[in-house]
Image (cartoon, helix red, strand yellow):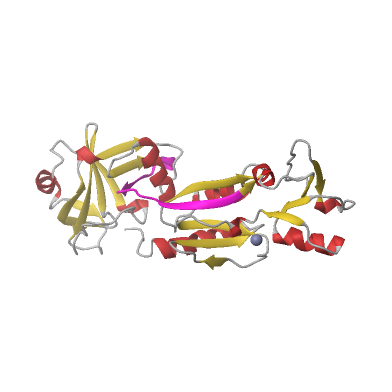
Amino acid sequence: MTVPTYAGRHNVVPGAYRGVAVTSVDCELDEPSLQGHFLGLDAYRRTRFIVVRNGPRTAIVGVAKASEEPLFSPITELRLLVGPDECVYLREPEVDTAIPTALALASLSSAPGKRGVVVEGKYAHVSFILDPEPLRVTVREVVPPYPAKLLDQARRVLATAEHLPPMELVPEVIELEDLALTRPSPGYLLPCRGGGVSVEGATTDYLDEHPEQRDWTLIGCERSQQIHEWFYGERAEQVDICPRKRVGGTGAILAKCCLLEREVEVDRPADAQVVVVPWGASLAQISEGLTRLAEEWEPTWEPA
Ligand SMILES: [Zn+2]
């Protein structure tokens, strides 16, 4: 058994909080001093990491033991993973330390620039993250209604996602009114009242109320256009609001599409991967979409 270096890896988080022990020492927090202190001491069967504190200073070490069979076994190897100059100990009682994204977001907001961040969080559990660098995921959505639904749902999924690498959501939210203004018209037709939009000097109608046809521009998706054709026998002037149709952007992108009902699809424009979920996606479908992005952009990530 030997202790990995984790060199060159980012977003290193322990797989289970029970692998992390917390201990206070009187010795210096450099590797030789910590080896002098810990080698030969018994450690619990599951302990693979020790958060070592000396006053306000904190270091994180990895340890190997003679055996993982008995309940306790002597420490045979110790490696300093991050020393006190680059490490910080946070008390964040609202943070669930079993969630990689929660650890990363706490470290970015409360300890930016630190390589090692220990978090004492909810239930008084202690865990840590080394070299936090969450995957940035652009979320494409339109508003109103507020809050931007896909963004809000993705946040809620990540807040409980133990299996996903840390992710940081980057909103790309466009106002329907701004889309309408790109196509001046005496009147606008919106899919429903939920998308409460009004443009000064223009009439507003709602497709789901099947209004008398007049001179209007549809602010809607392809599905709304199909309904328009069904109702009125022709397609309308249209500003297509479907987030899937947006062009440009690089990296990991989450979008939704009016025409998808159950499946999650993947588009691959240059330098990007766009995972597309149904317009009315469930949290499970959004979880599936984020998992697909993780497989593409963080294929080797796994809890340490
Ligand atoms: Zn669409």
The image quadrant that residue 240 belongs to is bottom right
Residue 296 against residue 121 in the figure, above or below: below
The image quadrant that residue 294 belongs to is bottom left
Q: Which quadrant of the figure contains the N terminus?
A: bottom left
Residue 57 is one of the magenta-drawn residues: no
- Where in the figure is residue 249, as x and y percent of width and height? 48, 55
266 to the left or right of 129: right
- Where in the figure is residue 124, as x and y percent of width and height? 40, 40
Q: Does residue 71 show up?
A: yes
Residues shaded magenta: 120-141
Nearer to the camera, 31 or 150: 150
Q: Which quadrant of the figure contains the C terminus?
A: bottom left
Residue 275 against residue 143 in the figure, above or below: below
Residue at left offset 81%, top offset 53%: 207
Residue 135 is one of the magenta-drawn residues: yes
Residue at left offset 75%, top offset 55%: 237
Name, please, the residue furthest toward the right.
212
